Every structure is written in structure tokens, then in C-alpha cells.
Amino acid sequence: MAAAVFHQCIGAIQVHSCGTEKSGNSSLRFTSRGFVIDCGLLRKGTCSSHRCKLHVIRACTSDASVMDPISSTSHNAIDCSQNTSIETALILIRHGESLWNEKNLFTGCVDVPLTKRGVEEAVEAGKRISNIPVDMIFTSALIRAQMTAMLAMTQHHRKKVPIVMHDESKEAKAWNQIYSEETKKQSIPVITAWQLNERMYGELQGLNKQETAERYGKEKVHEWRRSFDIPPPNGESLEMCSQRAVAYFREHIEPHLQSGKHVMVAAHGNSLRSIIMYLEKLTSQEVISLELSTGIPLLYIYTEGKFMRRGSPVGATEAGVYAYNRTLALYRQELDEMLH
Ligand SMILES: O=C(O)[C@@H](CO)OP(=O)(O)O
């Protein structure tokens, strides 16, 4: 039944439609008036089978106030009598191009900033996710990931202020306290963690990739770069990197998703490959052919302990990006109402 499919998509809704029964790949498109059901029968506002004009549905009544990022209250549990499971967004972004990417040098844990192009990539990434809610940001301890996260957030429609949390000492913690609840609500905590750093490339750090291949042979260098368990000289293998990155993700990031927070993670090629390996249950064979572009955000929806990949939002105005689940759709509705 079509209605059942809709219920799966966004929870309890009122359907003003012809009640056509058609199962399959129905999807929801957001408009300023509500959610347009695209059940495959709807074309340009009329149902091709039944000439039913209004295929507009609204989510169940909910004040769905969005995010209080710093306090731990979650507002995602929407008061619908049906489907109350929490769905949250996880955005992963590899940093934009760095000065050593540009020079084709092994970078690893060397703390190199973005190029001008990297800055532009980060801004572009921000546009793509500008309508996706973000309650918390995790970045590595490296400036290229932090720059990417901050630049991306300059594009976000919510205009909340990302604030780097400093809890490395008692003093640091005390000295960056915020004393206004209202200001806290307009902030997004940014947590930095070395565990999300790029894999440590050992004695390859600072060497040119092309010259290293000429010196040690292409196969050897490919093995260092893309095997799962063979480390470069005195560096970390992908397996070693994945042990710390995935442990951090499971202990420190996943609980926030579970509690209803929308999370963005800005990190690196290999720490993100490790996390994606975990999210998508890739084998060590599969992960070695996974490549991530700089500055392209990837969206996952977390619900009931599962991660569902939604690809990369293709643009801030792309219809459909926001209707992946009812929480995102309601968030989008609030944004629209706020902006117009
Ligand atoms: O140099 C590095 O730190 C990484 C990412 O740029 O390189 P690779 O893609 O070879 O793992």
C-alpha cells in the first residue's frame, strides 16, 4: 500500500490524495507546502492515473524545535503516535586540498594547511550540506580538517557558530566557558581528536610520491599506500589507523548519533576510509579500492543501530536531499519557514 510506504518514510502523516495503491520506490519531495509524494504516479502535480490534484502531505503535528547543540537535550524525538525511532544525519568530509596534496608529497600526520583550491572545496562542500542539520562537529587534530569544517560551516543556513572545545587541561576547560544559555544554543561544539588524524606515514612523510615510486618501485609504493595491513617504514598501516579511528568513532561519535544528535566529521583520506569500512562492513579487500575525493561530503542516516548511505548531496537546492527521513524533512521545513 502506498500509505504504508509513506509511513515508513516519514512517520505519521495525513495523506490528501486519491489513496492510490502502488508500492515500490515512492519518495518524498519537499515543497514549501509540505511533502509531495512521488509514488511514480504523480507527474507535475497531478496523479496521472486518478487526476487527483493534491498529493501534498504534511508531517504529523510537531513543534520539532531544532537542536540545542551544546546542552545534551535532543529534540529529535518527534511526538508522533507512530514510528518514534530516532534518525540522525552523519556527514563525513575529507579535508580540501592541502599544500602537500598539491605538491604530491606524503603528508600523514604533518600539519599542513589548505591551498586556495582547498579553501574553495571546503566552501563548496559547505553549500552542499547547508540545509542538513549539524549539532556537533568532530575533526582531527590537524589544521586542514579543522579549516575544512570551519569553512564549510560558513555556508550553513542555520548560522550557528562552531566553537572549538578545549578540555586539554582544567584551566583550558575553565577558560573557554560560555555563560549565556542563549549563546550556547547558537553554537555548535567542535571536538578535535588525534584519533581521527591521517594515518602516520612514517619515513615517507615529506617525500614526493612520484619520486618514491621511481626509487622503490611502483608496486612497493602501492603496497605501502593501499594495502590493508602492510605499514610504510615506521608508519601506520591502514589497519593500525582504523583501529584507533574506529574505536574513537564507536566510543565518542556513535553515542551522540544514538542520542539524537546530527554529527559532522571532518577528517582524512585514510581515517575516513577506516570509518567507512566500519559503517559499510567492507572487507579488507574491499577497502583498499575505496578512494575519497577531497572536499566531497558524504551523508549517512543513522537509525536503529544501522547506517544508511545517502551518497553526496549534490547541491543546496537539490530537491529530495532533505526528505530522506522525517527529521531532516521537518528540519528543512523549519529552515524554510525561518528564512522566508
Ligand atoms: O599523503 C597522505 O597523507 C595521504 C593522503 O593524502 O596519501 P595517500 O592517498 O597515499 O594515503
Image (spheres, rainbow, N blue to C red):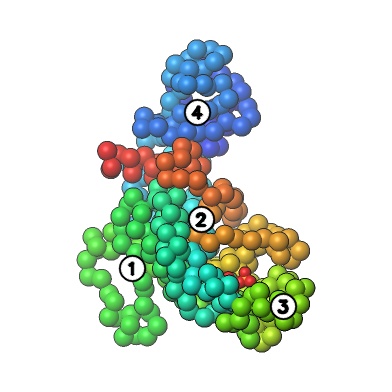
Gap in angstroms between the C-alphas marked 2 and 4: 27 Å
Kind of residue sitting beneath label 2: Pro
Q: Position of residue 313 (x, y in %)?
A: 50, 47
Query: On the image, numbered disc 3 is attached to which residue?
Result: 214
- Quarter-of-image position of residue 49: top right
Gap in angstroms between the C-alphas marked 4 and 1: 39 Å
Kind of residue sitting beneath label 1: Ile
Residue density around tag 3, few if under 14, some if 14–19, many if 20 or more, within 10 Å:
few
Q: Is residue 252 visible?
A: no
Give residue 37's mark. 4
Gap in angstroms between the C-alphas marked 4 and 3: 57 Å
**What residue is at 69 percent from the left and 85 percent from the top?**
233
**What residue is at 51 percent from the left and 55 percent from the top?**
297
Kind of residue sitting beneath label 4: Ile
Query: On the image, numbered disc 1 is attached to which residue?
Result: 163
Residue density around tag 2, few if under 14, some if 14–19, many if 20 or more, within 10 Å:
many
Q: Please tell me whether mark 2 or mark 4 is closer to you in this view.
A: 2
Q: Is residue 148 left or right of residue 42?
A: left
Query: On the image, numbered disc 2 is attached to which residue?
Result: 297
Closer to the N terminus: mark 2 or mark 4? Answer: 4
Kind of element beneath mark 2: strand
Gap in angstroms between the C-alphas marked 2 and 1: 20 Å
